[in-house]
Amino acid sequence: MYLSKREFTWHNNCPPEYYYIVQNSFSTSIDIASNLADKLSTVEQFLGFLPQRQDANPSGRVTLETFEAIYGKVLWDRTEPSYKSNNEAGLKRVTYVLKMAQKLASLPHNKTLTNQLEVMCDEKFWDYRFTEKDKDYYKDTRPEEAGGGRVMQLSGPACIGKTMGYSWASKTHSIDNIVLCPMPLARWDGMKDFSIEMFRHIDLSANYGRMTLGAMMSIWSEARDLPCPSNPGIDSYGWECITELGRTKPEESIQNADSFAFLGVALYLYKADWHTGFCEPLPGEGNVVIPRPPQHTPSPTPQSSPTPTPQHS
């Protein structure tokens, strides 16, 4: 996987109060992917030696167990049936996700992999036109060169409740679009430098970096939104759905965008063990503060609900 020979630019169309938050969010997403690539590369090498689980160092074990929580078991004991074939399949899943992380990590902070990308922080450009068979249709009033000019059906809620954002593709214009909802953005920038205790009752669904990374992966990689196994009517968003997907359909789970986003954010918050979906101290470290890596930090916001995607008319 590599960058296209043609480079595309992403445009931050957000107002001043959100502009730098969004700018940093996308830069942080690339940093998250780079960190994930480094950690999965180490796990890939470790698994290649057909090790025992106890051979992993504490940091490597946290990475391994977090991956397994999201994508299913990858390291089987030699006493377990079919351990060789299961370990081979597990290693292939690690390698697949590693390549996705490397692809995103190679992205310049002001470029995209495939299409022009437009990022908005409000929904003022939607203009209601009509309802037909209980379906509402809106016109995108933006200029055509920015992905607008089309009448589209919008299904489900948009920026209401706990929704953090949504995305869609203007395929006729080769333009991808993301709306980041203003309420989560307004709260996001004020929540930084949380300690383990402050994080303890906040699950990874609350992390805004996850939403941005998931949107980027949906648009710029092979990742997509797969159905939740226990509720096929919704996509696999959130800890319960993605871990169920990993347990029941591990080979398919590597295609799910939110699974990648959860893993990336969990391993980026590197001073904690998130393999249960909740923050726990690393062994022997007690109640520590999670230090921020230089420049960028994903910060938590209210828990997201499945992000709606406008449907083309």
Image: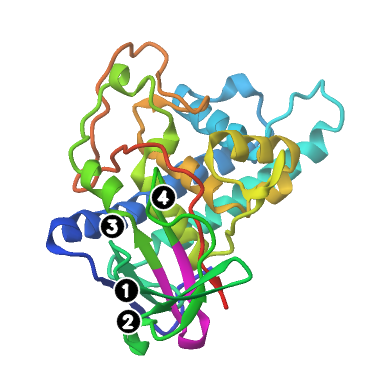
Residue labelled with disc 2: 142
Q: Residue at x 34, y 81 (%)?
A: 141
CA distance separating discs 4 and 2: 24 Å
Pick the front one: 311 or 265? 311
Residue labelled with disc 1: 125
Give the residue type that dot 3 points to: Ser
* Residue 277 within the segment the image draws in magenta: no
State which region is magenta. 167-177
Is 30 on the left-hand or right-hand side of 246?
left
Q: Residue furthest right?
A: 81
Q: Are marks 2 and 1 in contact (CB under 8 Å)?
A: yes
Give the residue type that dot 1 points to: Phe
CA distance separating discs 3 and 4: 13 Å
Residue labelled with disc 4: 211
User: Along the polypeptide, which appears first: circle 3 or circle 4?
Assistant: 3
User: Along the polypeptide, which appears first: circle 4 or circle 2?
Assistant: 2
Residue 27 disc label: 3
CA distance separating discs 3 and 2: 25 Å
x and y percentages locating residue 165 in the rendered image: 40, 55
Give the residue type that dot 2 points to: Arg
- In the rendered image, which quarter contains the N terminus? bottom right
Secondary structure of residue under mark 3: helix
Pick the front one: 197 or 55? 197
